[in-house]
Image: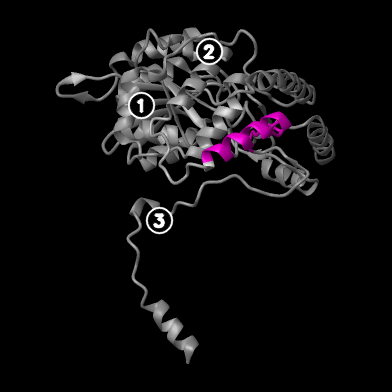
Amino acid sequence: MGARKERASMEQSPLLPLREELAQVTPYGAPQLDVAARLNVNENPYPPSPGMIADITQAVARAAEGLNRYPDRDFTALRKALAGYVRRESGLSFPVEQIWAANGSNEVMAQLLGAYAGPGRTVLGTEYSYSMYPEYVRGAHSRYVRVPRRSDYNVDVDALLQGLREVSPSVLLLANPNNPTGTASSEAELIQILQQARETGPVIDDRRTATVVVVDEAYAEFRSPGQPSALALLEKFPHLVVSRTMSKSFGMAGLRLGYLVAAPEVIADIMRVRLPYHLSALTQAAAIAALGHAEEQLRQLAELRERRDNLASWLESKGYTVPRTQANFVLFGPFPDRHQIFSDLLDRGVLIREVGPEGFLRVSIGTSQEDQAFRQALEEVTR
């Protein structure tokens, strides 16, 4: 009797008003599997040092004493700490008014699109770029338009400039270094794009606006010496936004702390759409403590860059096409059946990623032991 009543109740459940455009959408997410070598989501393979863990623990304990109060809504102390880190890493100084942070670069992007995208507007990007960009744009109820990349997977500047002219995007999303190809644009190319974007945005009150150019530098600290950051262009181009994260270089993917550097006017616009108290007191405290260990984290990256370049050279020696990467991963291929290679590697305890151009795979730089496990497994499955 009870079972019949339960079934009847379920049959009478009301239809939920899911947005029509989401009916065929599946939740985003790379596989999370417990394997020996997890090299699919570009994590820093090294956990925080004992010293960093101790400092974070103490900072969070102090913050916990005041959890009955709301956190600092404008997180001024954290923005000061981020400004100090940016100065240390890039040699460029920015006031607190030009720094913003959120729960991962995901929320940074959502806030930017909340301010500058929206219904009836267009966001421009490139093919073979970060797979979350279309998700961000869909969430903003906007149209996403991609322009092609060159055959070497670098940005096709001419195609991008044409796209700016033709679709009048309110925002351009440009990952640099790009994920999943690892390729990076030169400063001269960025200047060309920024100059074009001064008046390619939508028309508002009979005036042509700028396209907000978001240069996503999630992997900036992994770039080779001499590869410039877009931060150097902020003073000249107020419609430029440079987005970064603590997930990769700091080995703090679990913290979820992304940030951006932009003109004060951009920060003011973001504050129109941000949710109040979006950064918890615990997140703020942990991030500030972690930033105190910038020196040791930046030293660690040199070893990861060296092993990245060694792995790229090894893959090239095996006959694969390998775009020149400036990030902590390597794209390689093509394979007639990349899913078979992916599956065969997984059977051997090595998890990588099926992403990017048809036939290509992406592998993150892990520990030296994980890198060796990947090489051995790949040789086994391609004999």
Mark 2 crowdedness (10 Å alpha carbons): few <14, some 14-19, many ≥20: few
Q: Position of residue 143 (x, y in %)?
A: 34, 36
Q: Position of residue 333 (x, y in %)?
A: 69, 31
Q: Secondary structure at mark 2?
A: helix
Q: Secondary structure at mark 1?
A: strand
- Of 319 and 200, the residue lying toward us: 200
Compared with 72, 225 (above or below) is above
- Give the number of the mark in front: 2 or 1: 2
Q: Secondary structure at mark 3?
A: loop
Q: Amino acid at mark 3?
A: Ala
Q: Amino acid at mark 1?
A: Val
Q: Which residue is mark 2?
A: 87
Q: Residue at x 62, y 27 (%)?
A: 250
Q: Quadrant of residue 45?
A: top right
Q: Residue at x 58, y 24 (%)?
A: 291
In the displayed structure, does residue 226 sit left or right of residue 104?
Answer: right
Q: State whether the magenta stretch is mostly helix, strand or loop.
A: helix
Distance from the alpha carbon under mark 2 to that under mark 1: 27 Å
Taking the view exactly as shown, the residue that stands out farthest to the left is 206
Q: Residue at x 63, y 37 (%)?
A: 57
Q: Which residue is mark 1?
A: 171
- Of 72 and 224, the residue lying toward us: 72
Asked whether residue 57 is in view, the answer is yes
Distance from the alpha carbon under mark 3 to that under mark 2: 46 Å
Distance from the alpha carbon under mark 3 to that under mark 1: 26 Å
Asked if the residue at tag 2 contacts the one at tag 3, i.e. Cβ–Cβ closer than 8 Å, the answer is no
Q: Position of residue 240 (x, y in %)?
A: 39, 17
**Chain-order first, disc 3 or disc 1:** 3
- Of 196 and 82, the residue lying toward us: 82
Taking the view exactly as shown, the residue that stands out farthest to the bottom is 1
The span picked out in magenta is 41-63
| The magenta stretch spans residue 130 | no
